[in-house]
Image (tube, rainbow, N blue to C red):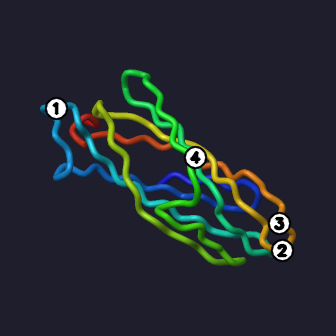
Amino acid sequence: MISKISEGVTVSVETFYQPDYSNPANSEYMFAYRITIENNNIYPVKLLRRHWYIYDATGSLREVEGEGVIGVQPQVNPGEKYQYVSGCNLRTEMGKMYGTYSMENVNNKKVFEVIIPAFEMTVPFKMN
């Protein structure tokens, strides 16, 4: 698991290769990732937007941005965690992702950026 603390928010990531949803013969590799967001601040925070940078082994870059995560803009109260699972498809057997969340201090409405740490996605047989 990879973790990073920024602006009082811990973002942790675990990745999982999804062989049942992948088709290596067609250069299609599917990965799932579980994100845990922990609010270490004394005020509630709300996740407003996400901005991802996704690289595959050829060096090609995709950017994904939008409101919330998996269709919601969760509020995370002090000392609480929010967890979700999403996925990413790659055209190669390995790649990486990283990015930022735009979050809001619910009490004073100030918006700040939280870093999503870089994490790798690798087909298990490539790790040998």
The quadrant where residue 56 appears: top left
Numbered disc 4: secondary structure? strand
| Whether label 3 touches label 2, CB < 8 Å | yes
Numbered disc 1: secondary structure? helix
| Whether label 3 touches label 4, CB < 8 Å | no
| Residue underneath mark 4 | 117
Q: Earlier in the sequence, mark 1 or mark 4?
A: 1
Q: Residues within 10 Å of mark 3 (few under 14, many from 20)?
A: few
- Amino acid type, mark 3: Lys
| Residue underneath mark 3 | 109
Residue 113 is situated, as x and y percent measured from the top left of the image, at: 72, 51
Q: Residue at x 20, y 50 (%)?
A: 21
User: How far is mark 2 from mark 1, CA to CA?
Assistant: 49 Å
Q: Which numbered disc covers residue 26?
A: 1
Q: Which numbered disc covers residue 105?
A: none
Q: Which numbered disc covers residue 107?
A: 2
Numbered disc 2: secondary structure? loop
Q: Earlier in the sequence, mark 3 or mark 1?
A: 1
Q: Quadrant of the C terminus?
A: top left
69 on left or right of 26 = right
- Amino acid type, mark 1: Asn
| Whether label 1 touches label 4, CB < 8 Å | no
